[in-house]
């Protein structure tokens, strides 16, 4: 299994709505609204790294209100 963390920058006031929408995406394990440079941290658990790209690029980045994402694949 591959675990990855996706940092999500949201439009102002959109974090709560985005969290709920992101949690509905298959293989998303958890999502947290956070303070700092990003607005949400999303954890995904998938079979291979290509699936991380699908979730990030096709799933999360396609949601209205998402400004930017950064994805980090766990090494352990």
Image (tube, grey):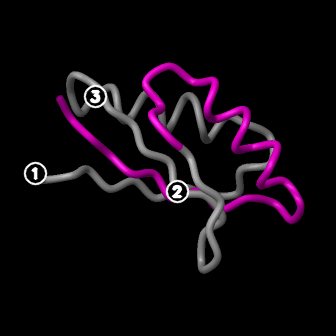
**18 left or right of 24?**
right
Q: Which residue is mark 2?
A: 41
Q: Residues within 10 Å of mark 2 (few under 14, many from 20)?
A: some
Q: Which residue is mark 3?
A: 50
Q: How far apart are the two marked residues, 2 and 3, measured between alpha carbons? A: 19 Å
Residue farthest bottom in this picture: 36
The magenta span reads 1-30
Q: How far apart are the two marked residues, 3 and 1, measured between alpha carbons? A: 17 Å
Question: Which label's residue is closer to the chain start, 3 or 1?
Answer: 3
Question: Which label's residue is closer to the chain start, 2 or 1?
Answer: 2
Tell me where residue 1 sits by quadrant: top left
Helix, strand or loop under label 1: loop
Image label count: 3
Q: Residue at x 50, y 19 (%)?
A: 26
Residue 58 on image: x %, y %: 54, 29
Q: Residues within 10 Å of mark 3 (few under 14, many from 20)?
A: few
Residue 38 on image: x %, y %: 60, 69
Q: Nearer the viewer, mark 2 or mark 3?
A: 2
Q: Nearer the viewer, residue 48 or 21?
A: 21
Tell me where residue 52 sits by quadrant: top left
The stretch drawn in magenta includes residue 37? no
Q: Residue at x 33, y 26 (%)?
A: 51
Q: Residue at x 73, y 59 (%)?
A: 10
Determine contact: label 2, label 3, CB under 8 Å. Answer: no
Q: Which residue is mark 1?
A: 76
Determine contact: label 3, label 1, CB under 8 Å. Answer: no
């Amino acid at each position: 299994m591959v675990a990855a963390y996706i940092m999500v920058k949201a439009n102002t006031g959109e974090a709560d709505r985005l969290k709920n929408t992101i949690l509905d995406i298959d293989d998303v394990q958890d999502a947290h609204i956070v303070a700092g440079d990003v607005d949400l941290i999303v954890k995904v658990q998938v079979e291979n790294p290509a699936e991380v790209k699908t979730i990030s690029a096709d799933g999360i980045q396609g949601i209205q209100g998402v400004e930017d994402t950064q994805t980090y694949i766990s090494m352990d």
